[in-house]
Structure formats: C-alpha cells, structure tokens
Image: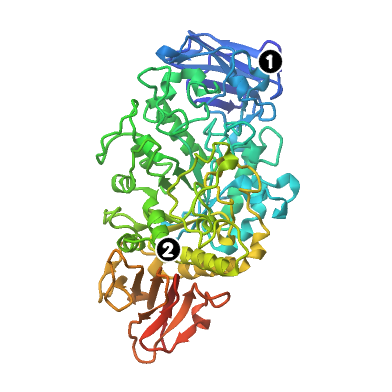
C-alpha cells in the first residue's frame, strides 16, 4: 500500500465497499457525525491503520452519506472507520473517535482472533482488538449454474440446524480442521438427504459476538449479530480473509445439488451492542439515534428484544439496510429463505409502538414481502417479541407471502401427549393446520410451520425426561429459560437405566413425531431429535458451546431404531398427496375432494370433553385413492378404537403403531400387517396408530 494514496470524492451509491476495475468506492451513512475517517490496514491484528483517510465534509459527503474512491486497491483490502461527534448520551449521541467501527455493509469480517468485547466497552483506543471489514468482489465466484430449488411449502420438511454444533463433536467423523464449519456440514449432506428433509434452517450465521455472554462462557446460538452481510467467520475452515464467504457459498451450492434449500435465521430485532453499558462496535458509534429505538431518556434503550436494545427497523435508513441484506443473501449468496427472529419487533414504529394492523400498511414487513428480489423465497416469522407483542396469525393474515412458526402447535401437542385435561379441541385445530389461527381461505395452509421443539427450549428427548429445567451451567442461578415447558419425565427426572421408563420415553417421542407429520402444515424438526439428542435438561443452552449442545454422532447407532422410524415416517408422508394440500381439508363424511372425518373411540363420535384424552380421524383423498385412519390415545390405559368399514375385499393395514418396537413400529404399505378384525383396533396406552386402506 502506498504511503500517500491518491483519492477521489467517490459517490453515495452503493453503500459499503464496492470494487471497480480501477479501485474501490467506500460509502457509509452517518447523519450526525461531524467527521468520518476511513482506516486501511495491512493486517487484521494491526495496532494502528497503515493509512487514515479523513473524509472532507464538502468533497466527500452527499446528504448524510460519506464517500471516497481510492484507485489501486482491490478485493481483500482490510478497512474500518472512526466517527467523530458529540458524546452526549442524555441526548442520544454516543460518538467516540477512539473506537474502530465496522462498516454495516461489510461483506466479510476479520480480526476475531484478537477481538475483545471489553475493549469496545471501556474507554480508550481499541484498534488492536477490533474487528475489521474486508473489501469483497462477489462477482468472482463460480456458481456453476446453481439455481434455487423452489420447493413448495406443501412439499417441505424443515430441519433446524446449528452449523457449528452439527459437526463439532469429536465423533462426527469430520476431519478436525473442518469440524463445526460450513465445509464440515457439506460432508454430512448425505445424512440429511437420507433423513428426508428438504430444507435446513440455519441458526444465525451472520457474524455474531461469541463474547456476548456471562464470564467464562461463549455465545453458541449466535443471536448477537454484529453485521448483517458477513457470514460468521468462526464457522469457516479457511483462515484467509475471504474464505468464509466462498466456503458458505460452497455449502449452499452443495445443498442445492441434493435438492435441499437453505433458510437463514436472521436477527433484525437487536444487535450485539446491547444496552447503554454495551460495546461500541458499529451502529452505535456511527449514528446511535438512527439505528436504535431510544427510551424517553435517550441515554437508555427500548428493550423489546430482551437483549438490551431494539433495532429501529422502520427507520428509512435501517429498513434499507435490512432489505439490502436480504437481497444480498438471495442474489449473491443464493439462500432460499429467512426465519425472522422476534419478527413482531419489525411491526413497531420508530418509537417502539405497534404499527396499526391494516392490510397495505407501509412498513418494513410489507416492504420485505413485496420485494421482487425476495419473491419466491420462504419468509417465516417468529410472530412474537420479548415485550408481549404477540402476532401469531397476523403475518399470514396481512402478508401474502409470510409463513409463521406456529407456537400454539408446539404447546397444544405437548399438552395432549402429556395427557393434560382440556387439550382435545386445540389438538384438532392444530391437526387441521390451525384454521382458528389462520383464517384466510386464499392462503396456503402450509404457511403454518408446525414444530414440537426448536433450539429454544428442551430437546425432544428432554421433553420426555425432565419435569423442570436444569440451567445452572448457564450461570444465572436457573432463572433463565422458560418455566412453561409442558414436559413430563415419564416417572423419573433425568437420565435413567430403568427399561420401562426408557421404553415409555421412546414411545412418547414417536407419538410426537407421528402427530407432527400427520398434521396439515409444514413440519419442522430440531437437529438431533431423531436420535434423542439431550441437553441434560438445559432449556436455554445459548451459551453452551460444548458437548452439551453438539450433535453426538454416537447416538445414530445407539438410537438407530428411532432414526429408522423417523426416516420411514418422513418418506411415507412425503409420498402422499393428502399431506400436500394447500387448502383446508373439508370436514365431512362424504366428498369427492380431499377430506377429513372426526372420530373418537367410536366412529363419528369424537369426545371433545375436558376429560378426553383420545382423538381419531380418517383422511381421504378420493382422486389419489388414499385413505388413512389415525388413532391417538393419550390415556393411561389401552382402548379399543372402532374402525371404519371398507368395501368388500379391502383391508386396513398397519403403517404405524408407536407402542411396538422396531421394525414393527413402522411398515411400508406393501409389507404392512393386515388388520383382520372387522370392527376395532386395540390402541395401547399413550400411543398412536396409523392405518391405511389397501385396495384389491
């Protein structure tokens, strides 16, 4: 790098660092800064920049955009900023020219080896311990004709997966240098393909602050975003400055080759800068008032995220950044969709008040769902926030393209399987894709993303093994994590060698999977649930980057019977048209269209009373010749369920009976046991049975 670089004024678009044939244009937004300095570095760990370019507020500023063009530099250049201005927290200003700031539009980031969060909190220069951006030219990557799979929701099975935890365990079979990386995940694609999933939903892979945790721990989940464009470098096996970007793209390309979509869990509700005691990393130091919703006392932050601050998503500058980020990940990184963490935060205005809920209301949510670049991607909302704004049903109701995590599905199915009272009516609605929640008749019913477990809460194994959370390892005296788990330990808290309890736990897990997959809607399962991954009762393992959270690959052989059951169940369900419907099923006894008939222990007599623990129903798709009868018994005694009569010569065949051991718990139709009893089937206590008609 020359000692005295020649510079030109540059231009205000695009934001970020843009590579041209003869140099790079830098542009950054700051409305209230009095001066901006662009810092250029030869190394990420450099204690001081090699070059400091002071931007002239006359020559290098258009409106509130500061810009400069520097000929001769190119992709790979390391850079950052300093911003000068008032430090007056009582008025919302937090400029600190001793702090090195990341470009919000940086495409890749270096310096995590020397990064120190505390250095960005305490006073003084943090240059030697700061993260820096890297200039990137995204056009040089060879996508080899890669295309988005564009799998309809009706044909989708989503697998929520942690990139690091999936292969970080020493027994993963992945080489040590690739464990916990994008490259390591590529090696496990055959496992995902065989399982039958069609989309991976990756926990946050935007660059996040692993130090944003209590002392002695490490942020594992990644819900502590530093930058919304750069892939997390800690998940890359490559150490070169541009390696994380290309390795992530290699992963996307490899998954697409196998017909698997990539959905990113994105966190636009808060950032890693936290509350007023947090670090100055980027947004706060560039323009605190623009990027965050401030309290009535501007020295403090509104905290609708529960994480210290709230990103001001409906500010014009911030909403543009969010849209630019989403567009970048779709157009340049080829991802297929997004799950929006605490999405109702994006439904708050710049003061934090809920935006009036009317169709056509202009806000960041409507801008996202109407954007032409994002058209056709999967947009999934976690429709609540930490301050009580609950919007399950509203995203699907008001937006034509949004889907939602169906939180009531999780809770109501748990309550039924646990044998809670007054759970039947809610269960029936969940099985039908929740028409009580999603009432729009012109919307795909598969916008209901059904799940029993996710990263936040118990694993499925722990759901049937613990009555209460065990979070002491998190250092918060077991006060963190939800207390409302609707879990049941089957008679003993925690790990046990009692064979009878273990058999019941296995049966309950199969019950959960069966109900998940026989329900209308889009199913999502949590990484490792198919092999009984445990967190030993920790239901908030956000800070446990260790074997407590990682996928233990020895469980694949230990619980091969459950894995086999889940694989067969997924492939069976995926092969039936009755589970690929996009409209609510008719609830009727006679129809030429796909329909459902409710029963109880006796035909046509569903027991919807508060003390009922049973539900049965028949699914019929006349056009495809599909006819199933499903019996759910959450009662603690066996019951004889009456069976619907069939035409002479046709018989019911047993596909699923969760009370049976492998291989009898699941059978393909061709090999399934014929039910010769004419009138009833004995359904064991706490079990599910799926029968299918086999026609002559």
Which of the labelled discs sits on residue 416, or is there none?
none
CA gap between label 2 and label 1 equals 60 Å
The image quadrant where one finds the C terminus is: bottom left
**Which image quadrant is residue 414 in?**
bottom left
Say which of 588 and 486 sits in front.
Answer: 486
Left or right of 84: which side holds 340? Answer: left
**Which image quadrant is residue 141 in?**
top right
Residue name at image x 62 percent, y 19 percent: 71
**Given this view, does label 2 or label 1 mark the residue nearer the observer?**
2
Residue farthest to the front? 492
Residue name at image x 67 percent, y 49 percent: 184
Residue name at image x 27 percent, y 69 percent: 587
Colouring style: rainbow
Say which of 232 and 299 sits in front.
Answer: 299
Left or right of 479: which side holds 679? Answer: left
Q: Which residue is mark 2?
A: 417
Q: Assess disc 2: are there few (<14), some (14-19) or many (≥20) residues with their C-alpha within 10 Å of its C-alpha.
A: many
What is the secondary structure assignment of the residue under circle 2?
A: helix
**Callouts 2 and 1 close, C-beta under 8 Å:** no
Q: Which residue is mark 1?
A: 48
* Residue 384 to residue 467: above or below: above
* Residue 626 to residue 324: above or below: below
The x, y position of residue 484, in whole percent, is 42, 48
């Amino acid at each position: 790098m020359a000692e005295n670089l020649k510079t030109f004024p540059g231009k205000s678009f695009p934001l970020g660092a843009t590579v041209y044939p003869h140099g790079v244009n830098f542009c950054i937004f700051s409305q209230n800064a009095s001066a901006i300095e662009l810092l250029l570095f030869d190394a990420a760990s450099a204690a001081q920049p090699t070059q400091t370019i002071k931007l002239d507020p006359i020559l290098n500023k258009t409106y509130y955009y500061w810009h400069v063009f520097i000929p001769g530099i190119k992709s790979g250049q390391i850079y950052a900023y300093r911003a000068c201005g008032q430090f007056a927290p009582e008025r919302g200003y937090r400029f600190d020219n001793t702090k090195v700031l990341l470009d919000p539009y940086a495409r890749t980031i270096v310096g995590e080896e020397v990064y120190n969060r505390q250095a960005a909190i305490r006073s003084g220069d943090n240059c030697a311990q700061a993260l820096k951006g890297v200039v990137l030219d995204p056009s040089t990557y060879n996508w080899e004709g890669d295309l988005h799979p564009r799998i309809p929701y009706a044909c989708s099975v989503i697998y929520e997966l942690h990139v690091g935890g999936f292969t970080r365990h020493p027994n993963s079979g992945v080489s040590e240098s690739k464990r916990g990386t994008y490259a390591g995940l590529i090696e496990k694609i055959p496992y995902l393909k065989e399982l039958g999933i069609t989309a991976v939903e990756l926990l946050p892979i935007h660059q996040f602050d692993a130090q944003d945790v209590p002392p002695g721990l490490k942020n594992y989940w990644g819900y502590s975003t530093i930058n919304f464009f750069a892939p997390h470098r800690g998940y890359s096996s490559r150490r070169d400055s541009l390696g994380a970007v290309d390795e992530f793209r290699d992963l996307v390309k490899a998954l697409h080759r196998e017909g698997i979509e990539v959905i990113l869990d994105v966190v636009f509700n808060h950032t890693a800068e936290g509350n007023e005691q947090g670090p100055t990393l980027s947004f706060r130091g560039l323009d605190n008032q623009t990027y965050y919703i401030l309290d009535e006392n501007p020295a403090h932050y509104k905290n609708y995220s529960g994480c210290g601050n709230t990103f001001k998503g409906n500010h014009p500058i911030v909403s543009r950044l969010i849209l630019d980020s989403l567009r970048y990940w779709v157009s340049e990184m080829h991802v297929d969709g997004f799950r929006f963490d605490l999405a109702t935060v994006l439904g708050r205005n710049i003061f934090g008040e809920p935006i009036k809920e009317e169709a056509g209301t202009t806000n960041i949510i409507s801008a996202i769902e109407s954007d032409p670049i994002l058209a056709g991607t999967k947009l999934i909302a976690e429709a609540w926030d930490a301050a009580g704004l609950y919007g399950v049903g509203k995203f699907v109701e008001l937006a034509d393209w949004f889907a939602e995590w169906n939180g009531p599905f999780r809770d109501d199915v748990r309550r039924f399987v646990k044998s809670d009272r007054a759970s039947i009516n809610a269960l029936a609605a969940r099985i039908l894709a929740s028409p009580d929640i999603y009432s729009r008749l012109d919307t795909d019913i598969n916008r209901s993303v059904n799940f029993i477990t996710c990263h936040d809460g118990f694993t499925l194994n722990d759901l049937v093994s613990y009555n209460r959370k065990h979070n002491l390892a998190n250092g918060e005296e077991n006060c963190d994590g939800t207390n409302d788990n609707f879990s049941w330990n089957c008679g003993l808290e925690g790990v046990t060698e009692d064979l009878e309890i273990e058999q019941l736990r296995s049966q309950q897990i199969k019950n959960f999977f069966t109900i998940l997959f026989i329900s209308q809607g889009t199913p999502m399962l949590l990484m490792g649930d198919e092999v009984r991954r445990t967190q030993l009762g920790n239901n908030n393992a956000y800070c446990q980057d260790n074997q407590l959270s990682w996928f233990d690959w020895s469980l694949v052989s230990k619980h091969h019977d459950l894995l086999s059951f889940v694989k067969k169940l997924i492939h069976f369900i995926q092969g039936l048209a009755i589970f690929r419907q996009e409209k609510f099923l008719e609830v009727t006894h006679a129809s030429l269209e796909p329909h459902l008939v409710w029963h109880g222990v006796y035909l046509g007599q569903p027991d919807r009373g508060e003390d009922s623990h049973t539900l049965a129903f028949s699914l019929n798709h006349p056009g495809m010749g599909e006819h199933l009868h499903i019996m759910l018994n959450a009662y603690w005694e066996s019951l004889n369920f009456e069976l619907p009569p069939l035409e002479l010569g046709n018989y019911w065949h047993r596909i699923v009976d969760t009370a049976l051991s492998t291989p009898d718990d699941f059978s393909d139709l061709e090999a399934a046991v014929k039910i010769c009893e004419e009138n009833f089937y004995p359904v064991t206590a706490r079990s599910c049975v799926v029968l299918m008609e086999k026609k002559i």
